Amino acid sequence: MNHLTEVTIYTDGACKGNPGQGGWGAILISGKHTREIYGGENETTNNRMELTAVIQALKALTRPCRVALYTDSTYVKNGIETWIVNWKKNGWKTSNKKPVKNHDLWQALDAEAARHQVSWFWVKGHADDAYNQRADELANRGVTECVGKK
């Protein structure tokens, strides 16, 4: 029987202006180990940063894992759990035949998520969850430290 490492991930995205300067952050927790990652982009949207946070967190895992992933983005949670099935079936078109926004990131997220056993959880943003608050701080750090340096 294959034993997968269990990892808990909290992610968040931030954007100053929408579009504008954006950042993403993630916290990866496994046993006693915690890793924080973050980054940013110049011209982006909040939704792109929310997706990037999840993609980068899953990419940071070097082998398949059992992941409990917490996001405060209903866009990410609904997209990966519900909408993506029809988007793929419809050639990355929405139900009204328009191209799916951020399809490049949705495809990347789909590929990264397929490497793992991911359970998706929504957490209320800017509330009382310390890990969500820390992910938000990392995302904002991504805006201030990473934007404009590329």
Image: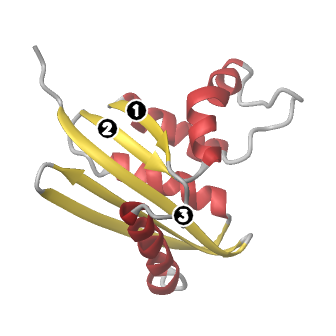
Q: Nearer the viewer, residue 146 or 7?
A: 7
Dots 1 and 2: beta carbons under 8 Å? Answer: yes
Mark 3 / mark 2, whichever is N-terminal: 3
Label 2 SS: strand
Residue 13: assigned label = 3
Residue 127 rendering spot, x and y as whole percentages: 52, 64
Residue drawn 54% across the image and 64% down it: 13
Dots 3 and 2: beta carbons under 8 Å? Answer: no
Residue 67: assigned label = 2
Residue 71 rendering spot, x and y as whole percentages: 49, 50
Mark 1 / mark 3, whichever is N-terminal: 3
Kindly identify the amino acid type of the residue bearing the numbered disc 2: Val
The residue tagged 1 is 119
Residue 105 rendering spot, x and y as whole percentages: 57, 46
Residue 7: assigned label = none
Dots 1 and 3: beta carbons under 8 Å? Answer: no
Residue drawn 40% across the image and 43% down it: 69
Label 3 SS: strand
The quarter of the picture where residue 15 lies is: bottom right
- Compared to 77, does 38 lie above or below? below
Q: In the rendered view, how is the structure colored?
A: secondary structure
Residue 33 rendering spot, x and y as whole percentages: 14, 57
